Image (cartoon, helix red, strand yellow):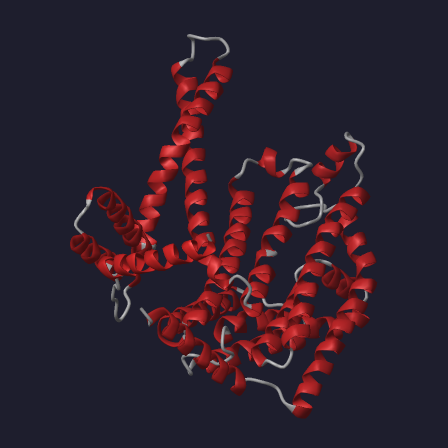
């Protein structure tokens, strides 16, 4: 049963050879470290200067159409006055989340840089975390609008942040382009951002550019799938799972918040408290990206990701189904009880809640079995095989039959290259035991 150990050793040896070929040495190591430190210092200066500009931008009430961003609309600002809340309070509240967002990205980038700045990919990922984490919140854009003198260094940070986060899809987890032709796509992406940010003066928002951006991002996803199936070893696959998990949670939450802003009733979208929930939610969910990347790069608890993905699939599906059932039951019961009970709303809510409580456990077990059969087939089959062997173990008395079944279970669940079972001879064990007895008796007689 040496197959898992051998595969792990091979994975580690491949990893060590690849790491040896992707390290900075000598003057290059000093240069890239100085470049990273200079960028970190520049970002700190920009944030110190840009926070007053961001505060001024966020407390300004948006007048007219298109007020779906972080600024309050005129209706929301007037509604907040009824609760003795000012735009200054809202700006301070949102800036706290933006500061938390930037600090987390900055700290994760610093830890990766401190631990593995000599590795090319780790340095590049730390650079991406450093620059994109500073680009996403408002301070840099507000500063560029109010004080154009800072536009050039801000454009440098924005360019590095936007280009590097997409290029990570092409380079992670070994720092090489795979397939090789994706290097051309990465070059086109870099040149396109260089043109729009520095020559056009802003990030492109035209339909053609959005189509190009989605195409580059889609090819990056394809590159990750290709790596996972053809190139990556066992450890690199676990790293990929962590990063994909973090990006998936962040992107799905980002899309869900945007879709909710389009389909929700205007009364909810114009609620004075919706920005207090929606805007911080963007920053909280996107924090999954640096956290998952830090775990993948620093290789801490890599093998827990399968359980985490499994639980996420189960409970997200369970939550969605229960929410739909709950809403459907309330609507149906209110319709059926109309004209029968005056307080039909309370009755419908109580009955729906009890139904959800009764459905929770059986529905969770059913979803767990479906996901295990569909996505974790080997683990599901192994669990069933072990359960069947445990049931047989209670009734089986023939040692030879039991040995054959044990070897069959090991072969089915672990799939080793070779499996053998050694049993101690009970007769030899009994002879050794009987040979010791006279010696013990003699020692007792001598002692007496």
Residue at the image point whose x is 52% and y is 79% from the top: 175
Residue 159 visible in the shown view = no
Residue at the image point whose x is 72% and y is 47% from the top: 62
User: Count the marks: how many?
Assistant: 0
Residue 134: horizontal and vertical position, in percent? 69, 64
Residue 251: horizontal and vertical position, in percent? 52, 56
User: Which is nearer the eye, 150 or 251?
Assistant: 251
Q: Is 315 rendered above or below residue 298?
A: above
Quadrant for the N terminus in the image? bottom left
Q: Quadrant of residue 203?
A: bottom right
User: Which is nearer the eye, 227 or 210?
Assistant: 227
Q: Quadrant of residue 315?
A: top left
* Residue 367 falls left or right of residue 221: left
User: Which is nearer the eye, 13 or 440?
Assistant: 440
* Residue 42 falls left or right of residue 434: right
Residue at the image point whose x is 80% and y is 62% from the top: 50
Residue at the image point whose x is 29% and y is 50% from the top: 386
Residue 11 visible in the shown view = yes
Q: Is 400 rendered above or below residue 210?
A: above
Residue 66: horizontal and vertical position, in percent? 63, 49
Residue 171: horizontal and vertical position, in percent? 50, 76
């Amino acid at each position: 049963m040496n197959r898992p150990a051998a595969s792990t050793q091979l994975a580690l040896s491949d990893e060590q050879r690849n790491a040896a070929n992707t390290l900075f040495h000598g003057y290059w190591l000093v240069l890239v470290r100085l470049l990273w430190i200079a960028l970190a210092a520049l970002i700190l200066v920009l944030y110190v200067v840009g926070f007053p500009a961001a505060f001024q931008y966020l407390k300004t009430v948006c007048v007219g159409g298109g007020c779906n961003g972080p600024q309050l609309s005129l209706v929301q600002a007037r509604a907040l006055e009824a609760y003795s809340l000012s735009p200054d309070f809202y700006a301070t509240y949102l800036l706290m989340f933006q500061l938390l967002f930037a600090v987390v990205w900055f700290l994760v980038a610093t830890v990766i840089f401190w631990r593995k700045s000599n590795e090319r990919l780790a340095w590049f990922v730390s650079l991406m975390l450093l620059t994109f984490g500073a680009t996403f919140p408002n301070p840099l854009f507000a500063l560029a609008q109010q004080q154009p003198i800072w536009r050039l260094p801000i454009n440098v940070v924005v360019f590095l942040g936007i280009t590097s986060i997409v290029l990570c899809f092409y380079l992670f987890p070994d720092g090489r382009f795979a397939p090789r032709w994706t290097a051309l796509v990465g070059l086109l992406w870099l040149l396109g951002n260089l043109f729009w940010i520095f020559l056009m003066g802003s990030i492109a928002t035209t339909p053609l550019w959005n189509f190009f951006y989605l195409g580059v991002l889609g090819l990056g996803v394809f590159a990750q799938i290709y790596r996972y199936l053809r190139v990556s070893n066992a450890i690199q696959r676990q790293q990929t799972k962590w990063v994909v998990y973090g990006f998936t949670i962040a992107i799905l939450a980002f899309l869900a918040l945007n879709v909710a802003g389009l389909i929700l009733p205007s009364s909810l979208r114009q609620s004075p408290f919706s920005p207090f929930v929606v805007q911080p939610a963007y920053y909280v969910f996107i924090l999954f990206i640096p956290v998952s990347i830090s775990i993948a790069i620093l290789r801490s608890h890599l093998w827990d990701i399968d359980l985490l993905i499994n639980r996420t699939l189960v409970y997200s599906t369970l939550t969605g189904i229960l929410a739909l059932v709950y809403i459907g039951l309330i609507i149906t019961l209110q319709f059926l009880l109309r004209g029968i009970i005056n307080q039909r709303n309370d009755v419908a809510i109580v009955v729906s809640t009890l139904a959800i409580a009764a459905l929770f456990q059986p529905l969770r077990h059913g979803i767990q079995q479906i996901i295990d059969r569909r996505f974790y087939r080997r683990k599901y089959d192994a669990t069933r095989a072990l359960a069947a062997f445990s049931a047989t173990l209670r009734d089986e008395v023939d040692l030879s039959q039991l040995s054959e079944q044990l070897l069959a279970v090991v072969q089915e669940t672990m799939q080793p290259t070779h499996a053998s079972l050694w049993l101690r001879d009970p007769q030899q064990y009994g002879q050794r035991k009987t040979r010791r007895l006279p010696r013990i008796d003699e020692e007792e007689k001598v002692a007496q």
